[in-house]
Amino acid sequence: MTCMFICSKVEDVSAIDIDELVMRAGHMKYTKQQIIVKEVEILHTLDFKIMMPCICDDVQSEFYNTVYMYHFSDIELSIIHEVAKFIDFQCMLLQYSSLAPNLDDKVFSKQLLKYAFEIISIKTLNIIIANNLIDGNKLWIHKKQDLLIIKKFFSILNYIEYKAEKNEQKESSLQDLMYQLYNDIEIEKINGKHLRKLYPSLFKVEMSDIIKEIFQKKRYY
């Protein structure tokens, strides 16, 4: 009950009133003084560290640090927004998982960033290919802007891959985790209704196929 009181102070716009807590949650079994004493005890035990950064904070930081290095046109910014949305989606998926305590959040966050750019870059490339002429084995890009977009996003991806720490086991663990979580929601194994509502485009057949293709290819690298 005291932990709920602390969480309310941190997370809620209007914290739970301690009198309401004593009456409604505690059913008058505990006094305000007992809750306050226990609150102080808990905070001292935690050394007042109740807002620790998590992997989602790390990946958002990595994302903004990378994006601020480049200048983007309006069209490119719309793609960057897709990347940001996909990172948000991955972080939502991770709420369904139990991350191993030995995994390095910094490494994990770099891999999340890489997957987001990789998936959205390939999706963008597929759209550009569909809108241009393919003659035999050659792709004829009509718009110079399309070429610049492809070049920029794959250069960003190369930079991220170069920057990411090399750890095949951790990368494989994240890859398998995200792929499994995505498929669990696809087949309604877990309750992903709110995710479908928030991110409907990420559950379309085309996006699902792109994600599966990327993860499937990675298994043979």
Image (cartoon, helix red, strand yellow):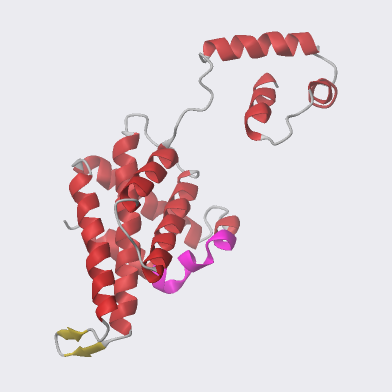
From this viewpoint, is residue 70 visible?
Answer: yes
Quarter of the image with the N terminus in it:
top right
Residue 98 in percent (x, y) is at 44, 38
Residue 156 falls left or right of residue 46: left
Q: How many marks?
A: 0
Q: What residue appears at the point 32 percent right and 83 percent down from the top-left corner? A: 130
Highlighted magenta segment, given as a residue range? 196-207
Residue 67 in percent (x, y) is at 34, 53
Q: Determine which quarter of the picture holds residue 62.
A: top left
Quarter of the image with the C terminus in it:
bottom left
Residue 3 in percent (x, y) is at 64, 22
Quick one: which residue is furthest to the left in this view?
137
> 181 and 203: which one is in front?
203
> 74 and 109: which one is in front?
74
Magenta stretch, main secondary structure class: helix
Q: From the viewer's perspective, is residue 98 above or below residue 153?
A: above
Q: Residue 198: within the magenta?
A: yes
From this viewpoint, is residue 218 visible?
Answer: no
Q: Determine which quarter of the picture holds residue 134.
A: bottom left
Residue 194 in percent (x, y) is at 60, 56
Q: From the viewer's perspective, is residue 16 above or below residue 68?
A: above
Residue 84 falls left or right of residue 122: right
> 93 and 88: which one is in front?
88
Q: From the viewer's perspective, is residue 114 above or below residue 12?
A: below
Q: Residue 14: within the magenta?
A: no
Q: What residue appears at the point 27 percent right and 63 percent down from the top-left corner? A: 153
Residue 140 falls left or right of residue 120: left
Residue 160 falls left or right of residue 16: left
Q: What residue appears at the point 23 percent right and 63 percent down from the top-left corner? A: 154
Q: What residue appears at the point 38 percent right and 48 percent down from the top-left corner? A: 64
